[in-house]
Image (tube, rainbow, N blue to C red):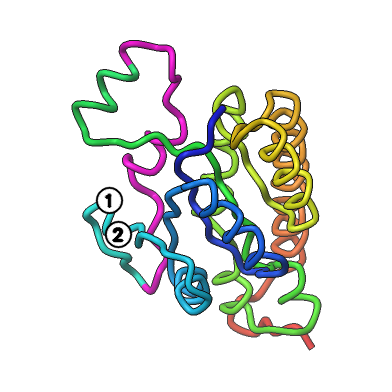
């Protein structure tokens, strides 16, 4: 699959400068949000704000920004399904070929000590939704959740003129579902230990 459009939204920006600049050299359009967009803008990587693409602003202190049909339709549509493509055309949806997302650092936040409210605000919603959607549709979408995988993705794209292979996409999809399983388990374990919310603070 040729990578023409990517969403990048990361909390860990390790290696992002090189990877984003690599994508731009292959003429990949980058959609981004918040701090990631500000970072990419600061290093001269042109991006499109997600809200500009969806036509809907970020709301509720950023709790809702990527949960939109133009985002998830762009990720989940089956490229060789004519009915899906009719919906894409009818609703102004663009194909999204790559998701570069790592999740809010929930485990790191609770391990260093935080209030219950801080823990709750570090439960990522949009990120898991996007990476699970991309992993479900790995036949067409490349999902990168770990900066350690940037090098392999770049090498595969170099060898295949800007495309990724199904083998790589499947490998990365498996990694997504392991990540989301571990992430949700950490949240479940945390909440299991709480009895009185009004008194709860991790020391």
Left or right: 184, with 6 as reference point: right
**Measuring 75% from the left and 25% from the top, which residue is drawn there?**
167
**Dots 2, 1 in contact, CB < 8 A:** yes
Whole-percent x and y of residue 180?
69, 46
Question: Does 123 sit above or below residue 188?
Answer: below
SS at mark 1 in the image: helix
Quadrant in which residue 31 is drawn? bottom left
Q: CA distance from mark 2 to mark 1?
A: 5 Å
How crowded is the residue under tag 2: few (<14 C-alpha within 10 Å), some, or many (20+)?
A: some
Image side of residue 81 versus residue 146, left or right: left
- Disc sitting over residue 54 in the figure: 1
Q: Residue at x 48, y 47 (%)?
A: 28
Question: In the rendered structure, which segment of residues is drawn in magenta?
Answer: 61-83
Circle 2 is placed at which residue position? 51
Q: Position of residue 178 (x, y in %)?
A: 77, 41
> With 159 as the anchor, is 27 left or right in this view?
left
Residue 196: image location, x then y, percent: 65, 75
């Amino acid at each position: 699959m040729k990578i023409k459009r990517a969403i990048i939204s990361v909390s860990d920006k390790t290696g992002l400068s090189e990877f984003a600049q690599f994508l731009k050299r292959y003429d990949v359009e980058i959609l981004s949000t918040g701090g990631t967009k500000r970072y990419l803008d600061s290093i001269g990587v042109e991006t499109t704000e997600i809200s500009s693409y969806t036509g809907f602003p970020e709301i509720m202190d950023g709790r809702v920004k990527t949960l939109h049909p133009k985002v998830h339709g762009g990720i989940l549509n089956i490229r060789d399904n004519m009915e899906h493509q009719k919906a894409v055309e009818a609703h102004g949806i663009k194909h999204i070929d790559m998701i570069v997302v790592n999740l809010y650092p929930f485990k790191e936040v609770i391990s260093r000590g935080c209030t219950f409210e801080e823990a709750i605000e570090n439960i990522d919603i949009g990120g898991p939704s996007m990476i699970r959607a991309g992993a479900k549709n790995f036949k067409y979408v490349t999902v990168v959740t770990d900066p350690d995988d940037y090098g392999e993705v770049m090498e595969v794209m170099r060898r295949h003129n800007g495309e990724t292979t199904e083998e790589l996409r499947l490998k990365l999809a498996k990694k997504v579902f392991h990540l989301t399983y571990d992430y949700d388990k950490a949240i479940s374990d945390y909440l299991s230990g709480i009895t009185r919310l009004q008194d709860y603070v991790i020391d």
